[in-house]
Amino acid sequence: MTPATPDIDTAVVGAGVGGLATAHALGRAGRGVHVFEAADAVGGRMRTLHSDGWRIDTGAEMLPSAGYTATWSLIRELGMAAEVSRVPGALSLWRGGRARPHAGRPLGLLTGGGLSPRARLELVRLQAGSGGDVGEPADPVTLEEFAASRSPEVRERFLYPLAAGFFGWRPERSAAAPLLAHLRSTGSTAHWRTYRGGMDALARRLAAGLQVSTGTAVHRVAAVPGGARLTLDGGTVTARSAVLAVPAPVAARLHPGAPADERGFLASCTFAPMLRVSLALARRPATAGGMRGFATLIPAAEDDLLNVITLDHNKHPDRAPDGRGLVSLIAAPPATAALMGAGDAEATAALAERAERYLPGLRSLVRRVHVHRFPHGLPEATPAALREHRTFRGRPARAVDYAGDWTQLRPCSEGAVASAQVTAARLLAHAAERPTSTHPVRPGRTLR
């Protein structure tokens, strides 16, 4: 039974961008909020490691100028607009021994990008949404089914590499419509931006205005009369409401008593694992095939092990000390499963050896290595998840709710920030009356 006066007003489990943005929105609405994070720092999948002048992003977050309405609104609200800058030469596609620049830009279609005129015309129609397209974002047609009627060039050199590189998706598992909707809404890669100071800049700014306990794991959340009960290492905490801002499989484990209209989606919302190896280098490496700019997508037809190479020192000058280099190697989806269970040395050796083809002499420059493993990397918009999503969206507001990109089936930070707006509105609607002041608990280490 929940005490008459809960320990806290609202508990948010997870200090990724989704959880922190939800806490921020609730705080602005007058709710008392306490955020609990199991890791020792905020950011989740948008965390940056700050080490001896290197700023090592654990993910590959980009800020398109279009399609990220909720994110840009939050950036402006926090006064951070001056803290983002353009990423030059943001995206290339490797083909035939060369890095083809201007991928995802109109200029790429004009200059060819290594594609035939027929394939370029097909891409124009595809990006315009014409010519036998899938329907609504909830359309369950898989990417593999959709791509079957496309030319091999467009299928193997555009659709599949983008799905793998952006989302870690396998075409036989995930639906085409959410991917196409994301590509069309975000527009040209020529307008990609990044955060100065690391991809965790937004998370750190949000956390600075919130009460956040890092190093504090929540093991269970249960709906009880009057609110929710959270089980932590040091005991239990009661709250008027709780938000699970963690991946769907983790949320299902923490909240086993979820109602039936939530359990179906929680069970079907699977995630693509992600493996990224970041190499801090003594100097900037030599490149092959004209590779420059920031990120190069490598189709499976070219390489079955490497999916993306990012020259992070080109992303923003503050990512590496002067004269040094920073490179990240992202495993292809089929290879990720095998390497996830390998040791750091084995995974690094496999990816770095293969990367020599694109960055000759790379291994001789390595000074330190950081391996980032995300078993729950990015949510897969599978047909099963799309079918369950409608029921999940239509559920009534409750004391225990969820936030994160998976709740929108949009695997990006915009999905996470947009989910925060939805979740905050649901919790505010659920509240029968304005919460009274409560005494926040302070388990674990509190971030200041």
Image: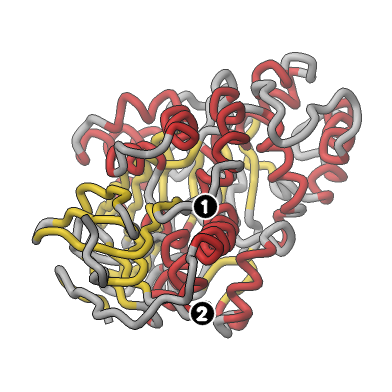
In the rendered view, does 14 fall on the left or right side of 105?
A: left
In the rendered view, does 195 fall on the left or right side of 277?
A: right
Residue 433 versus residue 270 in the image, above or below: below
Which amino acid type corresponds to the residue marked 1 in the rendered image?
Ala
x%, y% of residue 132? 87, 23
Which amino acid type corresponds to the residue marked 2 in the rendered image?
Arg
The answer to whether residue 332 is seen in the rendering is no
149 or 175, which lies in front? 175
Determine crowd level at label 2: few under 14, some 14-19, many 20+ residues with C-alpha closer than 10 A.
few
> Is label 2 or label 1 in front?
1
Q: Are marks 2 and 1 in contact (CB under 8 Å)?
A: no
x%, y% of residue 117? 89, 30
Could you say which quadrant of the image residue 296 lies in? top right
- Which of the image's four quarters has the N terminus? bottom left
Residue at 47% over, 53% down: 403
Could you say which quadrant of the image residue 245 lies in? bottom left
- Which of the image's four quarters has the C terminus? bottom left
Instruction: Measure the alpha-carbon separation of dots 2 and 1.
Output: 20 Å
**What's the coloring here?**
secondary structure
Q: Name the residue under label 2.
A: 28
Could you say which quadrant of the image residue 166 lies in? top right
Residue at 55% over, 79% down: 83
In the rendered view, does 427 fall on the left or right side of 338?
A: right
Q: Mark 1 points at which residue?
A: 397
x%, y% of residue 192? 66, 61
The answer to whether residue 280 is seen in the rendering is yes
Residue 441 versus residue 396 in the image, above or below: below
Check residue 378 in the rendering and tell me which mark sits there, or answer none: none
Residue at 27% over, 35% down: 347
Residue 297 versus residue 443 in the image, above or below: above
- Per the image, label 1 sits on a secondary structure element best described as loop
Residue at 73% over, 20% down: 146
